[in-house]
Amino acid sequence: MLSREMNEKLNAQITHEFYSSYLYRQMASCLNLMGMTMMESYFVAQADEERQHAIKLIDYVQKSGGKLVLGAIDAPAHDFKSALAVAEATLEHEKGVTGRIHALVAQAESDKDYSTRSYLQWYIDEQVEEEASIMELVQLTRMAGDNLLGLEDRVEKLLKARTPIPAQDLGV
């Protein structure tokens, strides 16, 4: 059984995962307006993956005897001036998500909730991968500078190397 604090924090994380999906959809739209279709595809896939992360957490809360309470989702930023601005904002966002996951782990350890601690390991591992991918995207975007077509080719290779996790692999 989840502690009250853990249940509340998991609910907050679920809302944050939905926010991440919302944010990445907004970023995809901004990239579309810039003509960056490969990067747009990458962010559409990221948005779908974040939604799956939220659904996976919902399932865990319910299976663990918790109560699901979804929070309001804030409007995301919507006026990114460049692909680099999108990539850098994404990296900062993912670093924040990592901090949130670490706080969940700390709560699980404080509660001696070893089931939740074990469950959260997947999210820890996922965040290492997320930050690494986005750091690579930031580096590619910086190197491309104004050469957006060159960036699109490099992003296409990055996309092929990192296919989003199918929903069935997330347990949903």
Image (spheres, rainbow, N blue to C red):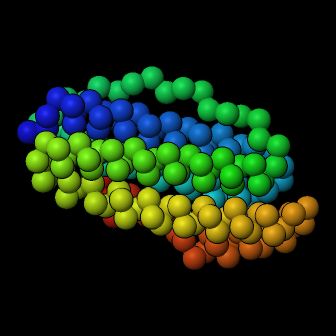
Instruction: Say which quarter of the image contains residue 147.
Output: bottom right
Is 1 displayed left or right of 126 in the figure? left
x and y percentages locating residue 112 in the rendered image: 11, 48
x and y percentages locating residue 115 in the rendered image: 13, 53
The residue shown at (20%, 53%) is 117
For this rendering, which residue is in front, 162 or 169? 162
For this rendering, which residue is in front, 128 or 46? 128
Visible residue check, residue 86: yes
Which quadrant: the N terminus?
A: top left
For this rendering, which residue is in front, 170 or 113? 113
The residue shown at (29%, 34%) is 9
x and y percentages locating residue 38 in the rendered image: 72, 62
With respect to residue 6, does 140 lie above or below? below
Residue placed farthest to the right in the image? 146
Residue placed farthest to the left in the image? 1
Is 151 displayed left or right of 126 in the figure? right
Instruction: Say which quarter of the image contains residue 33.
Output: top right
Visible residue check, residue 48: no
Is 104 displayed left or right of 79 in the figure? left
Instruction: Say which quarter of the image contains residue 36.
Output: bottom right
Residue placed farthest to the top in the image? 72
The residue shown at (13%, 42%) is 111
x and y percentages locating residue 52 in the rendered image: 40, 49
Is 140 displayed left or right of 118 in the figure? right
Q: How many marks?
A: 0
With respect to residue 145, does 64 lie above or below? above
With respect to residue 71, does 33 lie above or below? below
The residue shown at (19%, 58%) is 118
